Amino acid sequence: MVVAKSEITYARQFNFGGANNFSFELPANPAGNYLEITGFNHSTVSPVLYDLTNGKRYLADISNPSLVKVLLEPSVVTRKLLLVTQVSSYPIAVAQV
């Protein structure tokens, strides 16, 4: 029996293509991260970014409506993140990340 697995990690722009929820990973960064995300559908309500790895919750800054800005605390491990809208009219199906 032969079993193979491959993964590709690549840099990407933070353009979420009109999504109203989006999961992604960031590598460890002891200095923290500052994110500017475009293309996220927040409907003028500040979205929330959940750091599922470190158990943190961040309220995003949408003072510029075309950008979702978030300042993340440092992390010594790769983190799994989930950005979600707080607009109650959007159904959110969240699968295990």
Image (spheres, rainbow, N blue to C red):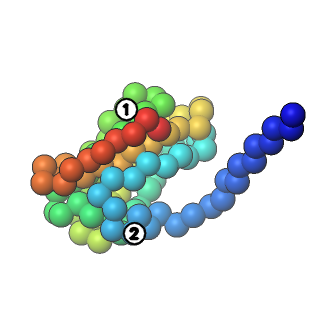
Q: What mark, if any, has residue 56 been given in the picture?
A: 1
Q: Residue at coordinates 35% horizontally, 49% vertically from top-left?
A: 83
Q: CA distance from mark 1 to mark 2?
A: 25 Å
Q: Can residue 37 be seen from the camera position used here?
A: yes
The three-letter amino acid code for the residue at tag 1 is Lys
Q: Can residue 72 be seen from the camera position used here?
A: no
Q: Position of residue 76 (x, y in %)?
A: 59, 32
Decide which of 33, 40 is in the foreground and name it: 40
Mark 2: give few (<14), some (14-19) or many (20+) Cα within 10 Å: few
The answer to whether residue 3 is above or below residue 36 is: above
The answer to whether residue 47 is above or below residue 77 is: below
Q: Position of residue 29 (x, y in %)?
A: 59, 42
- Pointer 2: what residue? 17
Callout in the foreground (1, 2)? 2
Pick the quarter of the image with the N terminus: top right
Query: Is 9 on the left-hand or right-hand side of 52?
Result: right
Q: Residue at coordinates 76% horizontally, 43% vertically from top-left?
A: 5
Count how many numbered circles sit on residues in the image: 2
Could you say which quadrant of the image residue 77 lies in?
Answer: top right
Q: Residue at coordinates 47% horizontally, 63% vertically from top-left?
A: 14
The three-letter amino acid code for the residue at tag 2 is Gly
Q: What mark, if any, has residue 64 been given in the picture?
A: none
Q: Position of residue 8 (x, y in %)?
A: 70, 54
